Image (cartoon, helix red, strand yellow):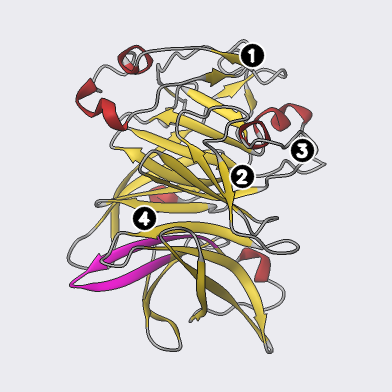
Amino acid sequence: MKNIKLSICTALVAVSFFACKKANDSVVPESLSSGQTASQSVTASAAGVTVLGAPIAEAKIYKLIKGYNKDDKFEASGVYYLNGYFYVASDNRFEIAKIKQTLPENSNENSLLGSGPGDSGFEGITYAAKSTPAFFVVEEAVANGSQYQPRIREYNSSMVYQSSLWADYYFTEANSNKGFEGIAWVARGGVDYLLGLVEGTGKIAVLKKNNNQWQKVTEITLPASASFTDYSDLTVYGNRVAITSQQDSKLWVGTLNSTDWAITGGKTYEFPKGNSSGVVGSGNNVLYANVEGVSFINDTQIVVVSDKAKSDQPSYQKFKDQSVHIFNLPL
């Protein structure tokens, strides 16, 4: 990947509505794929879906963490942006990658937090900005006796593991691989809630913590405009909800009601396509086919992370797998 230095305003100028009043929260791109430009023009697909421009920055995760190489797997499954860093969960690692938002390669500014043997099964990560801040990481669905349930792990603000509780949501062995793919923290009336996104249905469980578990309070059904083949992550930013689809290579943004547990409105975005060499904008191949995590950086910028491409996927989709990608998001 070649380095490219751009000012914030230059990186964002093609999106005319986005002024530099939030420049301190925006990303200065350091790296783009070979042959790719930082153009942020957006277009409308034939179905009226907004197609995102090329990412302003992206990088393979192994290139960011000092001491790792292309043989090291980072099967990214969730991401949360906080104070200039991306916290990335992977389903094959217990460590959480903490990556500086400017994506410096092979840098001591990036690190792995925590430890543990084997595959983690982590599928989503969120942060609770409360009096005692905490991170939460969800395991998709774990055998608990004769049933399968998501398990939610709590960490302190330094990503030190604290405890785990089951979520009051149940799967069979047959559909346990379609469990919770993402979680998001929401506070209402002094009460902490977690939203759990179900991969196979798009249902969102609303959970409240008690002494024994994260108890289901209700369940949200998404609007028809968010009808995807699968659902790979969600994030909440103010009253905005973003949901990704891995199989459809799309992102949906709606509005979380403040008075009840409902999500309304909605706009769909398609990740940009490219050629068989992985270059965005010069072909019609689906490149971003493994997006499994999403988080807002600010009102008009998101970060997404990609899982490892499967062996039966086209070779050009491997150019974007196991990576962090930063996109401008038109309103």
Neighbour tally class for label 2: few under 14, some 14-19, many 20 plus, Cα within 10 Å: some
Res. 59 mark: none
* Residue type of the residue flagged with mark 4: Pro
Name the residue located 59 percent from the left edge and 27 percent from the top edge: 105
Does label 2 or label 1 sit earlier along the sequence? 1
| Rendered image quadrant of residue 115 | bottom right
Q: Are marks 2 and 1 in contact (CB under 8 Å)?
A: no
- In which quadrant of the rendered image does the C terminus lie? top left
Residue 275 image offset from top left, x and y in percent? 67, 17
* On screen, residue 187 above or below 52: below
Residue 189 part of the magenta segment: yes
Q: CA distance from mark 2 to mark 1?
A: 25 Å
Q: CA distance from mark 3 to mark 4?
A: 30 Å
Residue 17 image offset from top left, x and y in percent? 23, 21
Does label 3 or label 1 sit earlier along the sequence? 1
Name the residue located 28 percent from the left edge and 37 percent from the top edge: 299
* On screen, residue 86 above or below 234: above
- Foreground mark, 1 or 4, reads 1
* Residue type of the residue flagged with mark 2: Gln
Neighbour tally class for label 3: few under 14, some 14-19, many 20 plus, Cα within 10 Å: few
Q: Nearer the viewer, residue 304 or 42?
A: 304
Residue 8 image offset from top left, x and y in percent? 33, 18
Provide the secondary structure element on which disc 2 rests: loop
* On screen, residue 281 above or below 51: above
Res. 223 mark: 4
Res. 247 mark: 2
- Foreground mark, 3 or 4, reads 3
Res. 34 mark: 1
- Residue occupied by mark 3: 313
Residue 2 part of the magenta segment: no
